[in-house]
Structure formats: C-alpha cells, structure tokens
Image (cartoon, rainbow, N blue to C red):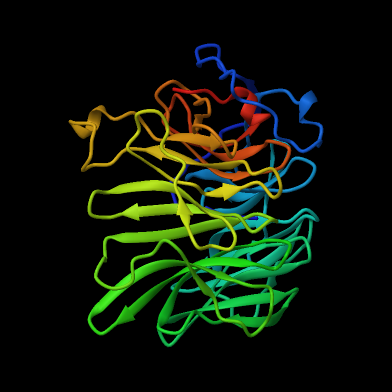
Amino acid sequence: MRRPIRAAVAVVAAAFLTPLLAAGPAPASSARSTDGGRGTTDCRPALQVLASLPGSGGSQVQGLGPNALAVGASRGLPAYWTGVRVHRVPLPAGFTGGEVAAVNAKGLMVGTLHGAGSTAAFSYRAGARTVTLLPEGAHAADVNDRGLIVGDAVKGGSLLGLEWDGARIHRWLAPPAGYTLTSVTALNNAGQIAGSGEGAKDDESWSAGLVWSARSGEAAVPLQRYWPAGVPYDVWYPRDIDRAGRIVGTHDFTRLDTRTPTQWLPPYTTESEPGLLGKRTSGTFEAISPTTRVSVGTALDSHVVGPFPPETAPPEQAQIWPGTGPLLALPRLVPKGASQAYAVSDDQRVGGSAVDAGSTPRAVVWTCALRQAYRP
C-alpha cells in the first residue's frame, strides 16, 4: 500500500495514450515479468498520460487500484482517474485543495484535505457525493484491503499516529519509549504499519524507521540500521510495506546530500541498500508492490557529491527494481523531461508524473513497466 516524498507537479491538457517513445532506449533484456500469474504476460508496455482537472497547476498519480483506477492530485485538488479520464473528489465547505494518497483493492480512497491553515484526513468512494472526514485526523496516508486506514493527528504541537477502522478510531499508534513520532506512512493487509521517529537522550538525537505490529497496544519497534546518539546526519524515511512485511524507503545522509533506496526485511534487524541507478549519486524508494517485490522511486543526484557543475546532472528519472539485480530506469515522456514514480501494482503498473515537451509535469502510468525498463 502506499504513498509518496512530495514533489511539485503540473497537469495534463488532454487525455491520451502514448506508446514507448521511439527515441527512448530499448528495454533491458534482464527486465522480466514478476506478476505472480496475474496476466501481465499479455500486457502492452506503454506510457499512459492522464487527463487533468481545469485550471492551472500540477498532477501526479500516488496510488493504483483495481480496474485501471488511479488516485492522486490534479491542479492542487484531490482527484482520481478511471483509465485516462479524470474525476474530482468533492470538497467539503472550508477546504480548497488536497490529495488522494492511496486506494485499496476494493476502491476505497484515503487522503488529506487542505483549508485555511488546517488539514483533515478523509476517505472516499468513486461517485459518492461527499467525502467521509476521519475523526481527529490531520492526514491519511494509506488504506488496506480490510478497510483499515493509517495517518496522524496534531495535538499540542505534537504528531500522534492514528489507525481508523472505517470512520472510527481503532487505535492510537505509540512510538517506542524515548522517541517522538515524525511520520506514519503505510500499512499492509496483515495490519503492520510503517513510519518514522526521532529518538533523543540528553543533548543527542537520532532518526529511525519504525514498524508497528497488528496487535493493538504494542509500541513501535525501531528499524535497524539506525545510529542512536551522536550521529544527526542520517535520516530514514520508510515509505511502504508489502503483504510479507518488507519495508522500502529512503536513507538520507544529509551531510553529503545523498539519498539511497533502502529496504528492511523481517525481523527488521538489518537495513540493506540495493544501490543506485547507473551513475546517479542519489535516489529514493517510494512504493513496493503488494506481493511481487517490485519497488519504485526516483533517481537523482547530490549537490555535494556531484556531478559538477551541478547543472550538468540529468533530470530526475523514475526508477524500478525487480527485487534482485540492478535498479532500472523507466522511459521519460520526453528525452530531457524529469519523471518520478510513486506507486506500483502487482500487474506492473507504475504511477507517477513525467514532464512533457512544454515543461509541464503530467500524471502518468507506465503499463507493463518491467518490460520497458532499461539499464542506463
């Protein structure tokens, strides 16, 4: 289940479907189907560009549901797509924007609304006249197929984790002793929840990824590798968790401005980093497919490590990892256009955004993604 490190995006002027660009690199021979028997052997590799809501601003896909359903934001408004057609999520009085962060296999969407100096967590089903506001919620980050929703609330200036069952609070998510909460980002169908926190002792502090079990009342457990006490430069951002409990995210070494795609496997005693895309010096993981171990994110470069001068670095690029071997690039919409990936499904759809020839980032879906992935 999932959702995304924030990135600025713009929108699509019209809906259309483009095949792989003739000018794009050929797919890597190592890119293979990992669909677990879900029929992607018959899929057609393409870069699908989605329509946008009226107005100005950006679009991005942040979650993928059943039957070509995608969710995200368009021109600053919460939106969802059926195929390439865009639909607006209705805004309650007092709210002016927002985003849909995730959708489950039954079409239940969750996200966050923005108003004048406030936010609210919500759930929604396609075609409904109104959203459902989640009690006490400031943000909703993910939803599983059982209808459990995770997010957070803000009280007294502190962030508090929340899990809802439908429209009622199911439990508050306590951080480990000695920690404060910094995010709640994802949950799986087993009820495990991922997020992050900050530990402190005396005058020292450190960052750690966190995981909560499905059992109510249990505090979160820090994900290794973290550096308690004295190393303030390492920050971990767990972003998604699959049905087997694999967690993916990003390790940010702030001293060198390097981000590295990261994974934690049960029992979460070690953290591993599968590398970077080609010669890129930085990158992220944003999502993992529910059962097929495919992870996606964005490749970029450090302003400290290089390349130099910084303006010679290529634009950001969506990347995909089959679970073994090297990271692979996904085709750009145009040769020099930036792209990002935020969601991936078991049938090898990848959702995100990609810049077109007019420098407008558009909401996109790569279909049969591993077949069009390549080694740069």
Q: Residue furthest bottom?
A: 156
Q: In the image, 318: left or right of 173?
A: left
Residue 197, position as x, y percentages in the image: 43, 72
Q: Residue furthest top?
A: 22
Q: Residue furthest left?
A: 309
Is residue 175 positioned above or below 266 on the image?
Answer: below
Q: In the image, 293: left or right of 201?
A: right
> If the image is split into quadrants, where does the C terminus sit?
top left
Q: Residue at x 39, y 46 (%)?
A: 260
Q: In the image, 271: left or right of 254?
A: right
Residue 207, position as x, y percentages in the image: 37, 67
Q: Residue at x 56, y 26 (%)?
A: 373
Residue 281, position as x, y percentages in the image: 32, 37
Asked whether residue 47 appears in the rendered view, the answer is no
Residue 237, position as x, y percentages in the image: 44, 59
Is residue 50 positioned above or below 43 on the image?
Answer: below
Is residue 275 positioned above or below 309 on the image?
Answer: below
Is residue 43 positioned above or below 304 on the image?
Answer: above
Q: Nearer the viewer, residue 264 or 187?
A: 264
